[in-house]
Image: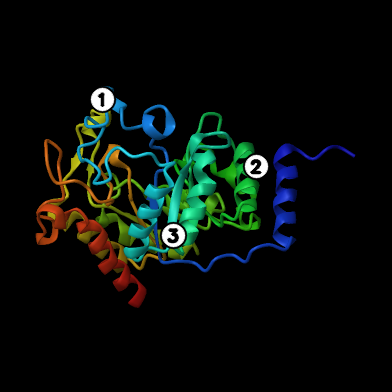
Amino acid sequence: MCEAPPVRRLLLVLFALLVLPGRAAAQPTPSAIFFYPWYSNPAHDGTWAHWQQGAHSPPLDIASAFFPARGSYSSDDYRVLRGQMRDIRSAGIGELVSSWWGRGSIEDARLRTVQRAAGRADLVTAVQLEPYPGRTADSVAADLVHLRGIGIRDVFVYEAADINAADWRALNLGLSGLRVFAQTGLVGFASAGGFAGFYTYDVLVFGGDKFGRLCAEAHAVGLLCAPSVGPGYDASEATGDPRVKPRDGGGTYDSMWRAALSAGADLVTITSYNEWSEGTQIEPAGHGGRYESYDGAYGLHGRAAERAYIRETARWTKTLATR
């Protein structure tokens, strides 16, 4: 008998995982936030990672238009992680989506620690499966087996269209024991690929004005709609990108939340908790020096403004939970 091809063998493993006893899947949550565990500093890790992008010289000169209230921290510092998880839980968010760049990456090495800290804050951990070098349909099939084996139940695939819909369909994602979402603005692609739903992530390309149409298209073909809301965008310090989406004192964030709720989103995804290099973060930011701040957001000033977006998120997630 001929040996089954690699993808088919992995699908058989996926199917076997479905019938093995294990931890019950967590209940779906109506909100999720993208989280980045990739920051390093010499005091904790022996080197800098991400803070030094764009020829910056941390700790005081960092690759961001904003400066974290926690300073240029290490994501491997458990004290930092505990504080971040408390922020996310206090914001009423139920799921943390940790950036994951494949087996052997620093994000992979830190995932179990993130899960432990998240669990202590009563948060569900998901992953955003990033376009790591060499990512293919076969490698993703193996990734899904691995991730499910460590308790992950939701996987958000960034730039899903890098793999064609037919190859996604061949993976039979519905048998993976996971909810797999495609990052795309093409609902037809997500449907053809066999995804459970789609999300948008990019708050520049996908404004709230697109959410109604996208959710309607998704619901018409039985997909979950998980549009991404965010407070703004400014990656000029990290990448030199001239495009900016102003925060407008919180107006940008509120308008995207209103659009997501009006569109009947099944899950509201938030871009992001701490993507400092792109300026999409809601993590508390400092209020002085040459950096931008949250000063003035929602009428708050000085230190009171540092947590402005955490507080506002709590208001929106409460609205989401009671709709």
* Mark 1 vs mark 2: in front: 1
Percent coordinates x, y for residue 126 in the rendering:
49, 53
Percent coordinates x, y for residue 176 in the rendering:
64, 54
Binning the other alpha carbons within 10 Å of mark 2 as few (below 14), some (14 to 19) or many (20 upward) gives some
Percent coordinates x, y for residue 13 in the rendering:
73, 49
Question: How many angstroms separate mark 3 from mark 2 (CA)?
Answer: 23 Å
Q: Earlier in the sequence, mark 1 or mark 2?
A: 1
Q: Pointer 1: what residue?
A: 57
Please indicate whether residue 205 sits to the left or right of residue 36 in the image: left
Q: Pointer 3: what residue?
A: 95
Kind of element beneath mark 2: helix
Q: Amino acid under label 2?
A: Ala
Identify which residue is drawn at 14% across, 46% down.
Answer: 287
Q: Pointer 2: what residue?
A: 142
Binning the other alpha carbons within 10 Å of mark 1 as few (below 14), some (14 to 19) or many (20 upward) gives few
Identify which residue is drawn at 61% across, 43% down.
Answer: 143
Percent coordinates x, y for residue 193 in the rendering:
55, 49
Kind of element beneath mark 3: strand
Q: Earlier in the sequence, mark 1 or mark 3?
A: 1
Residue 155 in view = no
Q: Quadrant of residue 270?
A: bottom left
The residue at the far right in this view is: 1
Residue 69 in view = yes
The residue at the far bottom in this view is: 322
Q: Earlier in the sequence, mark 3 or mark 2?
A: 3
* Mark 3 vs mark 2: in front: 3
Which quarter shows the N terminus?
Answer: top right
The residue at the far front in this view is: 43
Question: How many angstroms separate mark 1 from mark 2 (CA)?
Answer: 38 Å
Q: Amino acid under label 3?
A: Glu
Kind of element beneath mark 1: loop
